[in-house]
Amino acid sequence: MKVLVLGADGYLGWPTCMNLSRLGYDVIGVDNYLRRTLCLQEDCDPLFAVPNLQQRAELWKQKTGKNIGIEIGDLCDWGFVERIFDHHQPDAVVHYAEQPSAPYSQKDYDTAYLTLHNNLAVTFNVIQAVHAHAPSCHIVKLGTMGEYGTPNIDIEEGWIEIEHKGRQDRFLFPRQASSLYHTTKVMDTDLLWFYVRTWGLRVTDLMQGPVYGLETEENAGDERLYPFFNYDELFGTALNRFMVQAVAGYPLTVYGKGGQTRGYIHLMDTLQCVELSLRHPPKEGEMRIFNQFTETFSVNDLAQMVKKTGNELGLDVKIQHLENPRKEMENHYYNPAHTGLVELGLKPHKLTEQMLTDMMRTIIRYKDGIERQRIFRNVKW
């Protein structure tokens, strides 16, 4: 199977390229280095330097003998998108190519505009290119559990059955995103659903929770193949940020009461979920939605786990509750379904104390690269 991985330079993109390559897929990674550019502009470089895509592909070839093709270009540019789809004729496309940060999207007008323009334009171009040049191509799109918000009812897996005035129908589960970034993901879902109905596309929309972790089966023992590891407020995910803060002696930044609960997933399980989706494609004209996470934790849960593990490693870890800069519920009901990927064969990696210990030991090796001023930016909305 030939697969285009869009956003191949990112935290999820590069590990996905390696994983699919190892499993025998013909992989072409596509990126324009937007994430690197934004990190430079905002002074929030990752914990350690990461080779560019061509260098990564060469390292992978030296390690395994397998080729990962690389295409550098802007997926907002229709001419570039049309060329790569026409040339490669992919069987599937994994779409990560979006500005991925809620705080960045809320920072100011320019960051909001970039998020809106980039995320929707790329999704629209991918849909159009599939229709024009690879109509049987399976689109695997990374969504987010943040699309749903925190409703006071159980969150179903993408769809909900409604009975109203004696009649029944099936609808997308209501979305109520809490940032512009998450709202663009809702719009992605609506775009995809429209074109599934109109053009009979094959789509898997993965509602993923926050991801944590560094090592995968492909990069274990070779830190040159590690993904980006951001620890700043703009691009770092909660657990990754907390672990770096613990190593740096920076109080763990818990917003408000800390009861905000989300579904989390290890990087290795993201790779499993994507590959399972590729291996079991939907039918023509079907939009399949999976809730992609393995465990739920509150921010307080994560902070306490990092504090306990850090203290056992000899670190003096403190927790600080800050005034919440975000408009969000700090205590709420949260019970999302997540059975679809398990039924396909997902074998979850749970967040254990040993896993935390291993990740924090890796971070300790890079302690001298931590820039404390990058950790907290106090972006408010």
Image (spheres, rainbow, N blue to C red):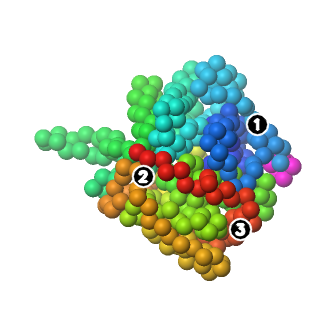
Q: Which residue is mark 2?
A: 325
Residues at marks 1 and 2, CA–CA distance in whole angstroms:
42 Å
Amino acid marked by disc 3: Ile
Mark 1 or mark 2: whose residue is earlier in sequence: 1
**Dot in front, 1 or 2:** 2
Mark 3 or mark 2: whose residue is earlier in sequence: 2
Residue at the image point whose x is 57% and y is 20% from the top:
132
**Dot in front, 3 or 2:** 2
Amino acid marked by disc 2: Pro
Rendered image quadrant of residue 48: bottom right
Q: What kind of element bears circle 1?
A: strand
Q: Is residue 88 above or below residue 290?
A: above
Q: Is residue 71 left or right of residue 103?
A: right
**Quick one: 115 or 321, which is closer to the camera?**
321
Prevailing secondary structure class for the magenta stretch in the rendered image: helix
Magenta region, residue range: 60-67
Question: Looking at the rendering, in which quadrant would you find the N terminus?
Answer: top right
Q: Is residue 154 above or below residue 86?
A: below
Amino acid marked by disc 1: Gly
Which numbered circle lies on residue 69? 1
Magenta stretch encompasses residue 317: no
Which numbered circle lies on residue 364? 3
**Dot in front, 1 or 3:** 3
Residues at marks 1 and 3, CA–CA distance in whole angstroms:
34 Å
Mark 1 or mark 3: whose residue is earlier in sequence: 1
